[in-house]
Amino acid sequence: MNTNQNSTPSANQTAASTLSVLDTAAANGSFGIFGRAVEKAGLKETLAGPGPFTVFAPTDAAFDSLPAGKLDELFKPENKEQLSAIINYHVVNGRRSAADVGKWDAARTVNGQPAPIKRDGETVSIDGARITVADLASANGVVHGIDKVNLPAAKKN
């Protein structure tokens, strides 16, 4: 796991420190679909706000692993609420490093549902999604890339 726990920020961290979590993810180049999903969910302004946020952003490859047609279905305007719930299940309030997250049993997501955390040696996962890119610093939080799109449990009426 790349945790970048040095006390001196790397060049990438310094450059990213003026960007929002969304702009930081976009600058990484692996999170284009996540950015589009945030826009379609109507959460772009929120995640560009002051935060701080910890975002577990599924990579483009993670989105590509969804069942055929699932993403297109989620991107339909009538599914905006469901997409928003999914995006919010990938966001935690506060600025948390991968090392911090690895100490938890669960993450309290903005969605309201807890996401289980597991640590196996240096590998940290959230609801079964491994953190593959850790600690991308931004002005309003931190981004961790994950290898799976996590779907929250359906809400009971």
Image (cartoon, rainbow, N blue to C red):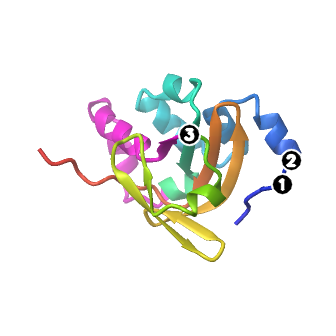
How far apart marks 2 and 1 lie (CA) works out to 8 Å
- Check if mark 1's residue and mark 3's residue have beta carbons within 8 Å: no
From the top left corner, tell me how far across and down residue 66 is, in percent: 41, 58
Give the amino acid type for the residue marked by disc 2 in the picture: Ser
**Which residue is under mark 2?**
10
Q: Secondary structure at mark 1?
A: loop
Q: Is residue 135 rendered to the left or right of residue 4?
A: left
In the rendered image, the vertical position of residue 116 relative to residue 114, given as above or below: below
Near mark 2 (Cα within 10 A), the count class, few <14, some 14-19 or many ≥20, is: few
- Chain-order first, disc 1 or disc 3: 1
Determine whether 155 is above or below 44 in the image: below
72 within the magenta span: yes
Helix, strand or loop for disc 3 = loop
Residue at position x 70%, y 31% from top?
139
Q: Which region of the structure is painted magenta?
A: 64-93
Task: Say what amino acid the circle numbered 3 marks.
Answer: Gly
Q: Which residue is mark 3?
A: 94
In three-dimensional space, the C-alpha distance between marks 1 and 3, rounded to whole angstroms, equals: 20 Å
